[in-house]
Every structure is written in structure tokens, then in C-alpha cells.
């Protein structure tokens, strides 16, 4: 099978999540460097293209206190990736960095420095957080209106790209005025690779104009094919070639030697990801009050939430829900399905179509279909256990994919080369220089 139909893997080391198992003796630290080193080196042994590091700019809170059932403090992403650059040699290093609370010239310099010292392995996952709760941690404070987040991000990204091209940058825009002369030489891959995960219409248009790789939420085969068609159409409208924007959905893999063993492991994983504490804490965010007196093995609370709308303090997945309407709908759904609180929260926290469960041979066959149809360019894998959650994939699944010719047998070079990306000078110039009025979204 040709290289263009090969799949590539990345590992997504999440910040806040309900995917990682916390309650097992096998669970390691989420902050010790040893955990990051071990999982990055395992991924590199498995020829993963990238180590993708999630990062939050403020600790998640729960009912006014730190959410202690999750990561409570983590080293800065670029600091961690610079350290990993010294103990790895080929795997890409993807830093999640925010466009709202960074300075474009400063961020451009730090990312290009990482790219240079890693010999062309750096990437930037562009995020557009805009809420005032996050902004309170920064000296400028404040926030962006929701409808402005992508026009602001586009201004920011174009400025960064101009800096990476070298020479003086004199930018006057709606959001930034920058006079800057670059100080870092161009890396082996020309510039850091650009990732993005926004899935709204504005986010997809932004990705089609500016980014190299989309970290998508479209994992099921038919859903992935439809998403590919949509992104190709959007890219074509801005003059980009078909499949020039790579797509790597986030996914979970629960694999074993036999189908029966995989199902048993799947049950164990779900049981340990969401236990009584996690289930009640999940509902508390929407009810707005403590639920210690509620039996997690019983039905959802019959009393109504004490808040009208859920807050942003636990992250975007928890914010903005109309609590009374949500509670009524959830009670009805759980009753219809015969679910207690734990069972209901598990069903809400993990979508079945985002998980590949089966024997190594079964999953290899499923992935071969994705490669055959060109549905995706690979998968960004969230390990359910840190730091050993990739071991089965690297030791048993990857060799089977290589036997089918749908997974690389060696690194190609820089991160850009490993992802099958090229430098399109025409697009690079268009992305940097087009007037903002042509690119702003409403």
C-alpha cells in the first residue's frame, strides 16, 4: 500500500479528563517527569509521529475548590517538551498554546526555539480559550467575545507565521500591532507544524486556511469520511490541494490477544475510570451542590439543581448547560435505560464510537478499512493508564498494522515529513498575507 494510505499514531497526554484511571496501583504520576519520559519513549519505539501534550491555563475547580479527582497542577508544556527533546530523537513534540493569553512574538520565538533544538520536531496545537475565568490568571485579564475568538486567533497565527518566515515583521491589525525582527534560525522542517481541534463551522474554516493537522472528534468510519469530505471542500475553497490538511481523530484503544480478553479489559477500564466519587462529582457540577448523601448506585437525584446554568470552572465540556432542563432530560434517559448514577455517568463520559475494543487482529482489520478509504491520516491515542497505556499497542498492534502495510516501518525525518506534509509556498504566503477582512468569521 502506498505511503499516502498509511496511518500514523500520536499519543495525547491529556491535562484534565475522565479517561485516565486514577484508582489503580498501576496508575503513575501525572506530573513527574518520569511518566512523561516513559510514555514518550514508548511511543517513539512504536514509531508514533507525535507526543501531543494538553495544557490548561488554570486549575479546574469543583464547587469552589480545586478539582482533586483530576490533574491538580502540571509543568508548563514547552518546558516539558524541551526536556523530552533531550531524551527522544524522532517523535514530534506538540505544545498546546493559547492565542488569547500569549503574545504572538514571544510565542513564535519559544516555539521556533523548541523546533530548532529538537531538529524539526515541534508543533503548536492552537487553542482559542476566551473566557474571563481563565483570563483572571493573566495580567491583561478579561476575555474575548465568543464570536471574536477565531478572528483574533487568525490575526495571531498569521503574525506568528510571518515571524517564522524571517526578516522584520511590521503588523498592524484589529488585535495586534507588532514590530519584530526574528532571532531564531529556521529549523530542519522550516517551521513548527500547526494543529487545531475546533469543530464549529468557524473552527473548520480556520483549520482549512491556517493549519496542517486537525485533531478531530470524528472517529466512527462514516462520520470520519463525512468530516474528510467537508474539510477537503473547505480547503479547496482557499486554494489548497485535496487531503493537504491531515486529520487525526482522538481515540481510545482497549486491545488484547483475544476478543474475550479485550471485552474483559474494557469492563475493567470503564469500572476504574468512573467510580462512585467521579460519578457524583460529574453530577455535582450541573446540580451546583454537594451530593454526598445521594447513593451513586441509585437513580439520579429527584430534587432540582440549585443553579440555573453550569459554570466554566470544570472546562468547556461542563459549561453553559441549562441545569433544570438538563436534569429533567437526564432523569428520563437514565430511567428509560435502567441506569443508576454510575452507569449513566459512564455512558455520558465515553462515547462507544470513540473507542476501539477488540483483539489485535480485529482492530488491525478495522483500521485497514480506514486506510483503504482514506478516512483519516491516523489517530491521536489517549492512554487510559499512565505511563504504561501504550505498551499493548506498541508491542502487538503496531506490528500487525506494519504487516498489512498501513503503518510506517521507520521514521521519515522531521515531524512534517513523518506526517506526510509538505511546504506549499503559495498557501504559506496566502495564509500570512491575505487581508483580515477576507478571513474574518462572523
Image (cartoon, rainbow, N blue to C red):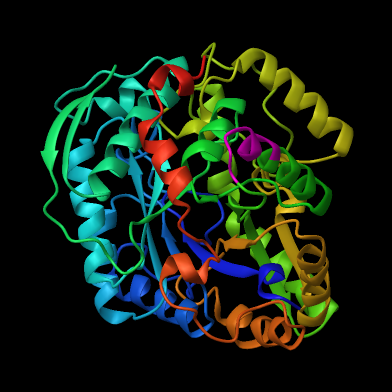
- Whether residue 237 is in magenta: the answer is yes
Q: How many marks?
A: 0
Q: Is residue 104 above or below residue 177?
A: below
Main structural element of the magenta stretch: helix, strand or loop? helix
Q: Please give the name of the residue rendered at 41% of the width and 80% of the height, measured from the top-left corner.
A: 41
The answer to whether 319 appears left or right of 174 in the picture is: right
Give the magenta-colored segment's residue range: 233-240
- In the rendered image, which quarter contains the N terminus? bottom right
Residue 288 percent across, percent down from the top left: 49, 22
Q: Is residue 47 above or below residue 377?
A: below
Q: Please give the name of the residue rendered at 40% of the width and 14% of the height, measured from the top-left corner.
A: 145
Residue 36 percent across, percent down from the top left: 36, 70
The answer to whether 141 appears left or right of 270 in the picture is: left
Q: Going by the picture, which residue comes out furthest to the front? A: 426
The residue nearer to you, when weighing 236 against 406, is 236
- Whether residue 139 is in magenta: the answer is no
The answer to whether 264 appears left or right of 198 in the picture is: right
Q: Please give the name of the residue rendered at 65% of the width and 82% of the height, measured from the top-left corner.
A: 398
Residue 363 percent across, percent down from the top left: 78, 73
Q: Going by the picture, which residue comes out furthest to the top? A: 308
The residue nearer to you, when weighing 217 against 368, is 368
Using the rendered image of the protein, determine whether residue 226 is visible from the camera's viewpoint: yes
Q: Is residue 301 above or below residue 74?
A: above
The image quarter containing residue 269 is bottom right
Amino acid at each position: 500500500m502506498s505511503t499516502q494510505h498509511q496511518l500514523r499514531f500520536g499519543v495525547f497526554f491529556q491535562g484534565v479528563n475522565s479517561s485516565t484511571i486514577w484508582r489503580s496501583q498501576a496508575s503513575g504520576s501525572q506530573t513527574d517527569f518520569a511518566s512523561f519520559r516513559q510514555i514518550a519513549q514508548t511511543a517513539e519505539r512504536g514509531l508514533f509521529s507525535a507526543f501531543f501534550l494538553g495544557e490548561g491555563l488554570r486549575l479546574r475547580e469543583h464547587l469552589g475548590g480545586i478539582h482533586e479527582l483530576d490533574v491538580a497542577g502540571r509543568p508548563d508544556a514547552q518546558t516539558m517538551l524541551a526536556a523530552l527533546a533531550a531524551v527522544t530523537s524522532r517523535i514530534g513534540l506538540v505544545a498546546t498554546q493559547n492565542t488569547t493569553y500569549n503574545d504572538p512574538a514571544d510565542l513564535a520565538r519559544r516555539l521556533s526555539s523548541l523546533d530548532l533544538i529538537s531538529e524539526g520536531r515541534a508543533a503548536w496545537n492552537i487553542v482559542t480559550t476566551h473566557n474571563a475565568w481563565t483570563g483572571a490568571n493573566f495580567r491583561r485579564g478579561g476575555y474575548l467575545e465568543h464570536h471574536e475568538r477565531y478572528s483574533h486567533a487568525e490575526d495571531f497565527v498569521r503574525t506568528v507565521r510571518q515571524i517564522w518566515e524571517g526578516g522584520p515583521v511590521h503588523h498592524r491589525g484589529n488585535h495586534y500591532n507588532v514590530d519584530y525582527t526574528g532571532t531564531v534560525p529556521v529549523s530542519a522542517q522550516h517551521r513548527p507544524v500547526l494543529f487545531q481541534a475546533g469543530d464549529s463551522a468557524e473552527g473548520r474554516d480556520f483549520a482549512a486556511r491556517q493549519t496542517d493537522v486537525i485533531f478531530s472528534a470524528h472517529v466512527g468510519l462514516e462520520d470520519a469520511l463525512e468530516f474528510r469530505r467537508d474539510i477537503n471542500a473547505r480547503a479547496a475553497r482557499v486554494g489548497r490541494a485535496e487531503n493537504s490538511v491531515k486529520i487525526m481523530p482522538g481515540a481510545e484503544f482497549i486491545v488484547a490477544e483475544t476478543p474475550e480478553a479485550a471485552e474483559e479489559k474494557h469492563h475493567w477500564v470503564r469500572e476504574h475510570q468512573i467510580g462512585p466519587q467521579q460519578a457524583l462529582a460529574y453530577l455535582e457540577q450541573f446540580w451546583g451542590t454537594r451530593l454526598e448523601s445521594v447513593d451513586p448506585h441509585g437513580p439520579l437525584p429527584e430534587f432540582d439543581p440549585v443553579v440555573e446554568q453550569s459554570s466554566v470552572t470544570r472546562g468547556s465540556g461542563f459549561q453553559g448547560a441549562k441545569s433544570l432542563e438538563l436534569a429533567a432530560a437526564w432523569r428520563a434517559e437514565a430511567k428509560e435505560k435502567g441506569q443508576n448514577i454510575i452507569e449513566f455517568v459512564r455512558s455520558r463520559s465515553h462515547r462507544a464510537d470513540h473507542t476501539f475494543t477488540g483483539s489485535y487482529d480485529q482492530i488491525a482489520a478495522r483500521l485497514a478499512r480506514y486506510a483503504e478509504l482514506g478516512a483519516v491520516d491516523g489517530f491521536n491515542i489517549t492512554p487510559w493508564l499512565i505511563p504504561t497505556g501504550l505498551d499493548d499497542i506498541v508491542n502487538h498492534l503496531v506490528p500487525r498494522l506494519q504487516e498489512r502495510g498501513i503503518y510506517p516501518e521507520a521514521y521519515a525525518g522531521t515531524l512534517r515529513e513523518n506526517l506526510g506534509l509538505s511546504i506549499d509556498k503559495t498557501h504559506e504566503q496566502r495564509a500570512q498575507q491575505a487581508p483580515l477582512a477576507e478571513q474574518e468569521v462572523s
